[in-house]
Amino acid sequence: MLTASIIPRMLGPSLFGDYKFLLYSFTQFTSLIGSGNNFLSVELAKNHYDKILISFYWTFILTSGILASIFLIPILNSNLYTTLFPGQNIFYLWLAFFLTFFIFIAQVLESMTDSCGLTKNGSIVNLLARVISVIFLLLFLFIFNWKNIFSVFSFSYISAFLLIVGFIGVLKIKNIPILYFKISFYDLKQKFNSFYKYSSPLFFLSIVALPLSFLSRWILQTFGGSLQQGYFSLSDSLSSFVITFSNSFIPLLLREFSISFNDKDINHMSSLFNKSISFLFAISSFFSVFLLLNASKATLLLGGKTFEGAILPMSIMLLYPIPYITNNIIYAFIYSTNRTVLLRNVMVISSIFGVLITFILVAPKKYFGLDLGAVGIAISMVFVTSLIYLVLLKYCVSALHLTWRKIIGNHIVVIILFLADGVITVNLCDFCIQNSLISLILSGMIYSLGAILIAKLFPKLLGISTMEVYALILPRLKKVRDSLIS
C-alpha cells in the first residue's frame, strides 16, 4: 500500500500510466512462458526433489526468454514499434522487458516454495524483500530526489533481485535442487512429452488470449492516452492489493487439489472446493465492499488530487477482486485435475468477447464507441471476469457434485450483509468525523467488528464453522485482556 501510494505521487497520472502500460505489455510475453508454470507446480508438489523436472523447466524458461528477445529486436527497430507502443521511449521499453522477465523468474521460484510446502518461509522472504526495496524507494525520493520513471524501474529491479536471491536461499536450505541444470536428451524428451500434453491447451490459450489482453490496454492507450491509462492503473493497483492479500491461499489450494486428485479423493476435493470458494469470496468481498464505499477517500489518499478522475474507475475496479479470486480457485481445481482444454475453450471465447466490449466502451464516438476511457475498460474487465466465473463454476460444481444455485445464493447474501455493515459504519463515521483519514480508519475498525459478528452469526456462509470462529477470535481476545491487565 505504501508503494502504491508513493509511485503514483512521484510520477503523476500520465507517467504512471506509461509505466504501467509498459509493464503490462511485456508481462504478456512472460505470461506466454508462464502458461506452463502450473505443470511445474503440480508435478513438484508430488516430488519436491525431482531434479530432471527442475532442470527441464529452467531449460524451457531460458530458451523461451532468448527467443522472446530475438523476436522483440526487429519489432523495436521497425515502424511497428511506434504503433504498438505509442509515445513510449525505447530505453524504457527494454527496461520494462527485462524487468518483467526477472519478476517472472521470482514468481516461478515463489511457486516452487509453495509446491514444496515452504510457503511460510517464502512469505518471510517476500515481506523482507518488499520492506528493503521500499527503503530504497524512499532513498530515491527523499535523498536523491529522483522523481522519474527510471527511479521507479530501479526500485522494481531491486525488489525482483531480492526476491530471486531470497527464494533460492530458502530452497537451497531445504536441499531442493533448485540450481540443477544437467539433463540428458532422453530425459528432456520424456519431460517435454508430459509437459506438452498438460500445457498445450494453455499455450494455445496464451497465444490467443494474451495478445487480446494487450489489445484491450492498447485500445485504452490509443484512444484515452497516458492520462486515462494512469487513472485505470491506479484503480488496478488498489484492486491488486485486495487480490494479493486473498490470493496468497491459492498456491496452497493448488497443492492440496493436486495431492487429492493423485489419491483419487473426490470427497476431500469437493469439501475443500466448497469451503475455500465460500471463504475466499467472503474475504475478497470484505475488503472490496469497504474500499468501494470509500473509493473517493482511497483514490485521493493514494494518488492525490491529480488522480481525482480515477474515482469512478476505482469504484468499478474494486469489484474486480471478487470474481478474480474465486476464478483462481476454479483454475487451481482445473489445473490440478488436468482439465486444461476446458479452460482454453472458455478463456479464448471470453477474451475475444472482452476486446469487443472494451472497444465499444473505450473508442470515441467517431468509431461508434462510448468514449468512456478508464471507466470503460474497468466495466469490461469486471463484467467478463464475472461471466467466466459463472460459466466455470457451473462445470466445477457438476464435477464435484455440489449445488450451483446454493453457492451463488450464498454469495449474494454475503455481499448484502457486508454492504449493510459498510453503509451503516461509513455513513455514521463520515457524519461524526470531518477528517477523512481518521474517518476511514475508524469506520474500518467498526466495519471489521461488524464482519466478526457476521462470521459469528452466519459462519457457514463464510465457509467456516462456529468452532473455527472461536479458535480464531478467543486467543486474540485473551492477549488483549492480558495486555490490558498488565
Image: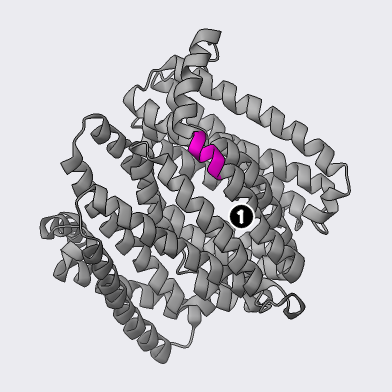
In the image: residue 267, left or right of residue 415: left
Please state the horizontal and vertical placement of residue 387, each as a whole percent of the image. 43, 64
Let me know if residue 72 is in the magenta part. no
Q: Quadrant of the C terminus?
A: bottom left
Let me know if residue 201 is in the magenta part. yes
In the image: residue 431, left or right of residue 452: right
**Image color mode:** one colour
Secondary structure mostly seen in magenta is helix
Nearest to the observer: residue 294 or residue 215: 215
Residue occupying the point 69% across, 75% down: 306
Name of the residue lying farthest toward the bottom? 431
Q: For numbered disc 1, what is the local secondary structure? A: helix
Q: Height in image: 190 above or below 224?
A: above
Residue occupying the point 37% across, 40% down: 339
Give the quadrant of residue 106: top right
Q: Height in image: 185 above or below 6?
A: above
Q: Is residue 40 visible?
A: yes
Give the quadrant of residue 376: bottom right
Residue assigned mark 1: 213
Please state the horizontal and vertical placement of residue 50, each as a whole percent of the image. 40, 17
Please state the horizontal and vertical placement of residue 118, each as a whole percent of the image. 36, 32
Provide the residue span drawn in magenta: 200-205
Nearest to the observer: residue 167 or residue 71: 71
